[in-house]
Amino acid sequence: MLPVIQIPDKKGYSRCAFGWQGPLCDQCILYPGCKHGSCHNTPWQCNCDVNWGGILCDKEEFYSQFFITTIFWRSRKMSQRFDKAVNWCIGIKNKAYLNYCRHEPCQNGGLCQNIAPDKYECICTKGFLGINCQISHIPCSSNPCHNSGTCLDFHNSFMCNCAAGWTGNTCEMDINECVSAPCLHGGTCVDRVNGYQCLCPTGRQGTHCQLDSDECAGQPCMNAVTCQDLLGDYHCECQEGWTGKNCDTNINDCADQCQNSGVCVDLVSGYRCICAPGYIGRDCQIQVDECASNPCQNGGICIDLIPGYSCKCPDGLTGQNCQIDTDLCTPNPCQRRARCFIMEGDYFCLCPPGYDGKDCSQPKVIEVQEIDSCTVSIPTNNSGGVLLVSSGICGRHGLCISQPGGSYVCSCNMGYKGDYCHENVNDCRSNPCQNSGTCIDLINSYQCICSQGWEGTLCNINKNDCEPNPCRNWGRCIDLVAGFMCQCADGWKGKTCTLRESQCDPFTCANGGICIDLGETFTCHCPINRSGNTCQIPLVKACDSNPCQNNGTCVNSGDSFTCLCKEAFEGPLCQHNVNDCNPFPCFNGGTCIDGVNWYKCQCAKGFTGPDCRINIDECLLSPCTYGSTCIDGIGEYRCICPPGRSGVRCEEVLGQRASPMSCLFKQRLYKENITFEHDCNRCMCQNGVIKCSKIWCGPQNCAAHPNISVPAVTCGPHESCVVETEWTCITKPCLPWGQCKDLAQIKETQPKGLHTQCVPNSDHLSHHCTRITLVFDKSKMPAGVSVEALCDIIRQLSILQDVVREQTVYILCGLQTGRSESLHIMMSTDPSKVSKSSILQTAVDSLTQAFSRKLTNSSALAAVIQVRVDAALENDHTYEDFPCESGDWQDHISERPRKKDINVELHRSRSRNAGKPIVNADSYEEDEIV
């Protein structure tokens, strides 16, 4: 046995040497392809077995004219024989042949024939060729026909039946259908497979460009009256104010319109000038003459400025209008026997202990506690005593009524109106005085001053100038309008029948009229400004020029007049505004801003309230982080930090990192699971992350309250505060509300950044836009509710904030056009960020359920009597109907698939037997108007 030949590999294992195999590497490897042979201790051999031959031992031996039983060794030549004597093959005379056909070498049905020693021939069947008929020769088997052509077999050849549009022996050529030039009117022919396409020039269409195009079909004209189709073109007849090929360019009407640095706002077919101070007029072309109203008092000389005016005061007088005597301490204005000190244009009272104010008339305020929105409590010098003082917000003609949530309502006395009862109701608006009588507006009444010849409450009774009878000597009196005429007895003449010789006496014609004696009668030639039988009627009245300013009432008095001023104005022409800041009403360093029959205190830092008596509690908003103690100061606060923390708000942790379960938000640290409010959303600290509901809080108010320090945003450059009209107030009185708008887009009412089509009074509905219509009973709604205030209440409903967590929901509100008791609530999401309407649908479901909850009487939502939902329907999806109990809801669904309408009739009752709400009402009683 041969020794084992092993070679170690890289990993230390043994492998056989080349040419050997087996567990002991003692088996030689045959020559590749050897079939009936073996190797003997030498690799790569093929020693044939008995009766086999050939290189691979795959050919069987046979003999011609030689038959022996001698065994041939396959590895020897076939022309030899085996000689036992020498144990070797020797040459033989009779040669042996191999029977090649025994093993059927011919494939695919071929017939095998031995044609010579060591040679055979295969006669192949149809479609095959090669030595062993192994090659297929079916002409169509190689798919010679291109472009979907069909191959037809003909003996050893083929023919291609080409598809439409192709030609050639193998269908390789595309037939050019453009050869016949089928395109008309200059159209360009583009060859296609089994066809062609005509690219038509402008103005032509059709398969062969044979038709004229209707360029107006695509509605290219935007702001046009009509679109006129032309050959290869169109013409837009633009509406007024528009230009351009498609009427899409607004004509700039601002070219050189506004004068004197006025800012021009371009409108559609028009413009509007925002004048610089000191100018008025459509084009700001008129300089305001501030001296026309004679503002300078006491002989002061008015100098007109741009803008404003300046008064050059006589000696001893000062002030903007020369209204202040420089010796303001004579007489002493200080009360409580306080000493007066003259200051530049002012005076100062050194008040005794316990008193304060400009003239020491007010008890000194140590600390003020706000009782409600109308009353404050002031400690007195008496131990434990307090002085309840009205805020005076409703003035002298109204009663302040405190409302929930810190608001108030002014209940006006008879004859007054306005948010602060500062406007006298004009009882003369209906012109009750007849026959040219002058109406004097009084408090909750009026008085008619009758023209000459009339009397009565309404000047509707002709005054009887014949009583007592002015005619003498048996003359008969005839009553006229504002006069009389005497029919004298025979022998008497004159105005009152007192003359014998003439109809005229010195008093016949009044007011400078000239009397002409006509014998039996007379006539008066009146001056140019008089008329009537005796020149008793003035033609031009002194009040015809409306000399009284600021809605003052003019009363004719002969050839002169008298002005009866409205409250808050004074002067011969009612030209002066009464200074409502005198006596000074503001405390704690507040600045008084004088208005027309009102004032506003602009408080110093740290104070608030109508008269700045209330110290702002800076700790109310909890500026110090969790676990700290806040100490309130005047206009500031101080945080006392717990051990281990420091910083202005105790937000810094010393010695160790803050707990991972705490959240830092807006410079404040919140503990785990703490819930707090941010704007109109509810936030919570969870696992170290602040999570807030995502409800758009609406536009901010830029309109400041005229008499209360209400926070208002400041508009940016090139912006204007557009105040909403009065119709947005649902139940009066409402605080003013406005929105900052770009001057170039002053007409736009849509807040920035919203889905532009989802607005109130729009028919637009989609999977990202739903409309809810509320119908309410205004008599049940609290006072002071506006559209935006009601919209804020809806945005802050807890039931809505609980579900709006993943994506921002926008809520816009507006009164339904033509209906003051119906409100449109438009709820939408951004379609570019939400793939499905499930978020919006959940929010709509939650909001509509909130309207059926048990609500307190003070809630504005308690006044809702009907709810209607208009929403788009998705394919194969039905908007979930609201559950019904005790007849609380009624659903009416319109035809599919455009939208689904749900009408909800609310029947709320405070009795125990009323229908139950859809969910537990106790969870939602906190959603009230404040």
Image (cartoon, grey):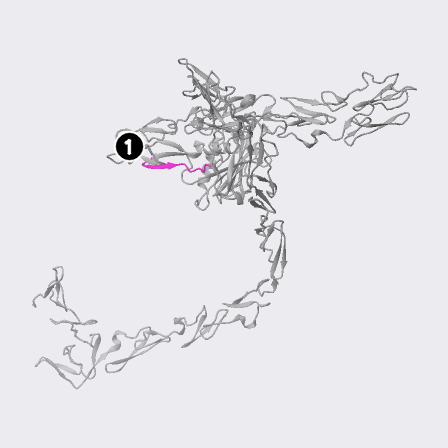
Residue 747's image quarter? top right
Q: Position of residue 58 (x, y in %)?
A: 22, 74
Q: Which residues are magenta?
A: 686-697
Q: Position of residue 405 (x, y in %)?
A: 46, 26
Q: Is residue 396 above or below residue 321?
A: above
* Left/right of residue 213 with respect to residue 21 in the rendered view: right
Q: Which residue is mark 1?
A: 646
Classify 10 Å Cα crowding around label 1: few (below 14), some (14-19), many (20 and above): some
Residue 268 highlighted magenta (yes or no): no
Name which residue type carries label 1: Ser
Residue 275's image quarter? top right
Q: Is residue 897 visible?
A: no
Q: Residue at x 57, y 33 (%)?
A: 726
Decide which of 267, 826 is in the foreground and name it.
Answer: 267
Q: Is residue 395 above or below residue 107?
A: above
Decide which of 114, 368 is in the foreground and name it.
Answer: 368
Q: Residue at x 28, y 28 (%)?
A: 642
Residue 866's image quarter? top right
Q: Is residue 665 visible?
A: yes
